[in-house]
Image: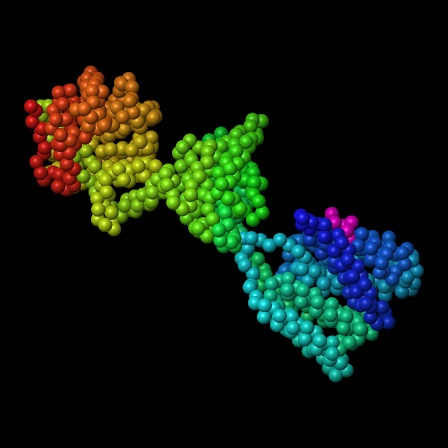
Amino acid sequence: MPTPPRSFWLVPLFVALYSAGGLLGGLLVVGPDGVVLLWPPGALSFVLLMREGRRKWWLVALADLTYSLVGSPAPLSFLPFSMAANVAGALAASTVARRLGMRSGDLFHLGSVRVLLIAGATLALASLPFGLMGLVLTGVTPPSAVGDAAITWLVANVFGVLVLGPGISLLWRSQDDPLALPTTALVGFERSAWCVALGLSLTVVALTPHETVRNAAAVLAVPTIVLLWAAVRMPPRWAAAGCLVTGLALTLTAAFNLGALEEPKNTQEALILLMLLFTLMLAPLVLMAALEDGRQAANDALRRARIDDLTGLANRSGLQHLATESLARVRQGRPMLLALVDIDNFKLLNDAGGLAEGDQFLRSIGGLLRGALAPGDVIGRLAADQFVLLLHDVPRERAEGRALAIVKRIGEYRHPLEDGQWLTVSASVGAVPFSAGEAGFDPLLRLADAACATAKELGGDRLHLAEALGKSGAVAERSSAMRWAVRLDRALREGHFRLYCQSIVPLGADHGGRRHFEILLRLVDPDTGDLLPPGQFVPAAERFKMGPKLDRHVLDRTLEWLEASPHALDQIEVCAINLCAASVNDPGFLDFLRQRVSSSPVPADRLCLEITETSAVRDLTDAQAFIAAARDLGVRLALDDFGAGFCSFAYLRQLDVDFIKIDGSFTRDIETSGLSMSIVRSIAEIARGLDKRTVAEFVETDAIRLRLAQLGVDFGQGYGIDRPVPIEQYFHRPAPVVVPR
């Protein structure tokens, strides 16, 4: 059975409280002047309009009608005046309080005492004309007693707001903030002890005869001390309830001439009593408000730190907090799903529509995803265009369907643009189904991020599902690459790379005797001292866009070593250095190349930069621009791994390189594959026609070397000719020479 909405209970509850407050007010009439010490309905009406908004004015009228029919001692002819007085007073007081800056969520705080006093006076003055008119016209009050009636009316309403308003407001139901600091955790013993102490203190006041007490304020200090205890140790609602109960109890004690409080004999004594009660109630409330204001300031700062200003969702810090709290609350084994959503090509939207349009789009996507949540689910914005959802009660067999629904939901969204056009987007989603207790939020998020990156690399607009335990396939590969990226960053900072050299030698007649070699990179494992080949770390560098950084490091280290070794520089014909694809397309790397080469004493024509065929063909325009800029510096170029992508030979006319390096897969098979031999022969012949030199990689045996020489290949490189050695040793041994047969 569904739970009724809060508004369903508001009407009968308020009407009941209003009527009870009216009956209670009738009991608080003291002295021969008939002074009403407090008028609770006025405070209730004021708090209602402050908490629920002034649109609820009709509820005040309804409650007053009910009270007039069932409990008011006034004649029914007074009803229209009573309704007008109470509605007008509550509306005026709430309007003035809001204009003076009082917050509806926290009616009592350090700055609210002045506002409460003004609001109480406004309520009393705004309702007074209607009340006096009704009292006189209905014969309840003779014209000669209008002055006393006015004072009674003002006192009852002003002190009703002052004494009862803060407590009623703080007890009013409000929603807890999930991102707030936790409140004080009280043990049951302390709560019970406080309740007992408050009851005993009020009993002391009620049972101590006022004839035996010279100073009633001394007796009233007993419940005040208990309330100060509540202000320091209890949550605000407990302290508010204590103040409200104490205020009503002490007022009733005085009205019935009980205990330490004597019934006021006139209006002046009634005012003094009310001022005393208000002061005693004010002290714990001010202390509580001071502590609560400090806590609220900390909460505001915490919310600013945990909330994304753009979307209103939790940011990375808030997401961490909410997800961790959520996982800690659920029972072990509960099926859950963590999904990371990454908008595809979001940069294109920013470029096309501007940053403001991109911000509006992200707000819309945030709202769209929030609408897909069930109660208890968690959502947050992880990064610029990344959102994370933690979904409860999603069995593994339904996980894929639930995650696919997210992909579909975003794909079906049409975002309106200012020019009247509509934009559709797609998303890549990495999802991890798991059971509560299997893993913490951080490892699950890393796994979801790896799965999402895999989905993007597979083309985007899709879901990639990963398992929290027993990872395999593309996600495991991605996770391994991410760990390598971290190791690479450390290696670059701490200098764990070593330069090795491998000779490239002529397969025919000797070309001058100087050294032609390629710089090869090795990574020293700082933990084991093992040398790791580039095949283990270069793919990770390229995947995580660290290639240009790595290439800068290698080029800079090579030039530094050569600059410090003039004896080696004299032996060099060509020093080849590999570049990754990203460096060719990176303007920053080209700027670095210009600066570094122009400032180095190493002749530029002794450097040869090797770029792969696939990277050159992928963006031919950028490759041509890079080759032209390098040639302007005097640097030579080589097209590496040629043939691996079955590049059209027509591209060779557009790529002005000096060397063509034949892919090693053809070299290895040249003795057993007629196709490989034909391809090698064709490359050699076309290169000669274009006045370019060819280099065959992976020359492992004398037989392969001889066959390559017969096919017209110019140079060979491989273990059958020369093995890589550290650059520090390379120039201290004779250069390898291949004698033609």
Q: Is residue 677 above or below residue 465?
A: above
Camera-nearest residue between 410 and 235: 410
Q: Main secondary structure of the magenta part?
A: helix
Q: What residue sits 30% from the left and 27% below the top?
A: 614
Q: Is residue 56 magenta?
A: yes
Report the side of 437 relative to 729 (left or right): right
Q: Is residue 458 magenta?
A: no
Q: Does the rendering let one see residue 129?
A: no
Q: Is residue 233 above or below residue 68?
A: below
Which image quadrant for residue 718?
A: top left
Vertical placement of 304 versus 548: above or below?
below
- Image vertical order of residue 213 relative to residue 68, above or below: below
Left or right side of 98 for 541? left
Give the percent coordinates (x, y) of residue 648: 29, 19
Q: Residue at x 27, y 26 (%)?
A: 644
Please identify the quadrant where the C terminus is shown: top left
Which residue occupies 61% across, 72% down?
Answer: 193
Name the side, left or right, on which 42 lies relative to 294: right
Between 360 and 498, the residue placed more toward the observer is: 498
Residue lying farthest front?
Answer: 397
Residue 132 visible? The answer is yes
**In the displayed image of the protein, which residue is found farthest to the top?**
689
Question: What segment is highlighted magenta in the picture?
Answer: 55-61
Q: Position of residue 123 (x, y in %)?
A: 77, 57
Q: Give residue 452's position: percent from left, percent from top.
A: 43, 39
